[in-house]
Image (tube, rainbow, N blue to C red):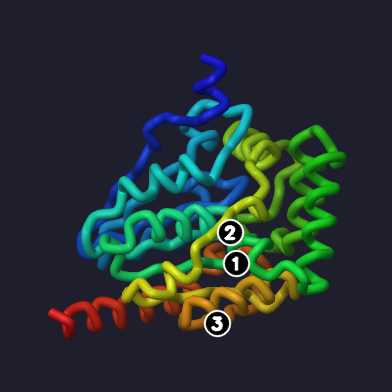
Amino acid sequence: MASERRAGRATPVVEVAGAGPRLVLVHGSLLNARRQWVLQRSLASSFTLVLPNRTGYPPHPPLDYVDFEPQADDVARLLEEGSHLVGFSYGGIVALLAAARRPEAIRSLTVIEPPALRLARGHPAVDRLFLDMSTLFWSGPREPRPFVEEFLQLVGGKMQGTAMQLPQTLPPDLEQGARALMVERAPWDARIDLPALARAPFPKLVVSGNHLPALDAICDTLEQELRAERAVIPGGGHNIPLMGAPFNDALVGFLERAERQAAARG
């Protein structure tokens, strides 16, 4: 039905693998969970990986509108007591909202360059990115590949010599991911309750790549307001998880510290 196609109120397709503490990984835009977290599969030796595919992304059917609010509800329902929650880019916004819904279930929260522009509005680079992104979404190319090309240039997402290099002809899953990106609710609409998250006792980690002043400013705000740890992992642009070991090592170190803190609290 058209209303279901627009609202995206379907049960998310979730892959679960591994054993150990529960680690929920929320993918960003363009890539679904399989493509986004390919270099984090090795963590299944120490954690139970929970990999939801956000609605609108394969293997879900396409949607006319992709909204972070129902997706945050989906992720919140996946959180069991003691869950570690990680969100990348648009998935970072989903993770922040889900964490505010279920703080009692969370052992730690990690966000990687979420484009929550509202949090740092007034910063010149953030305001410039808002204008550029608004122009792209309102009057940019209507075909998936040129749209993604412009999008990746704005967010620093295109990396040479990595799995993120955009093919000339998009395979079906990437084309659907591109079309989902094109109809995502604007991330600057997100209203994130930072004071509530700051009060929550679980540790927080903010990850950035030191490549785009606007995203750095948002991460600076999150670090300060949430009293979070900060990891800066340069060299990968916006696609920090696709760097593999540098990101994995920083994440695992943080998760292990969170586990020790939880054990000490009893």
> Residue at coordinates 37% horizontally, 81% vertically from top-left?
253
Q: Is residue 40 above or below residue 94?
A: below
* Residue 233 pos. (x, y %): 58, 79
Q: Residue at x 35, y 70 (%)?
A: 108
Give the x, y percent position of residue 80.
Answer: 24, 55
Mark 3 or mark 1, whichever is nearer to me: 3
Question: Would you call the spot at circle 2 few (<14 residues within 10 Å), some (14-19), or many (20 or more)?
Answer: many
Secondary-structure class at tag 3: helix
Residue at (59%, 62%) from the top-left corner? 114
Task: Give me the disc on residue 224.
Answer: 3
CA gap, disc 1 to disc 2? 5 Å
> For this rendering, which residue is in front, 101 or 218?
101
Q: What's the CA distance linking mark 3 and mark 1?
A: 14 Å
Query: Mark on residue 89?
Result: 2
> Looking at the image, which residue is at 33% across and 57% down?
102
Q: Secondary structure at mark 1?
A: loop
Asked if disc 3 and disc 2 are in contact, CB closer than 8 Å, the reply is no
Q: Is residue 260 visible?
A: yes
Identify the residue position indicated by label 1 in the image.
Answer: 113
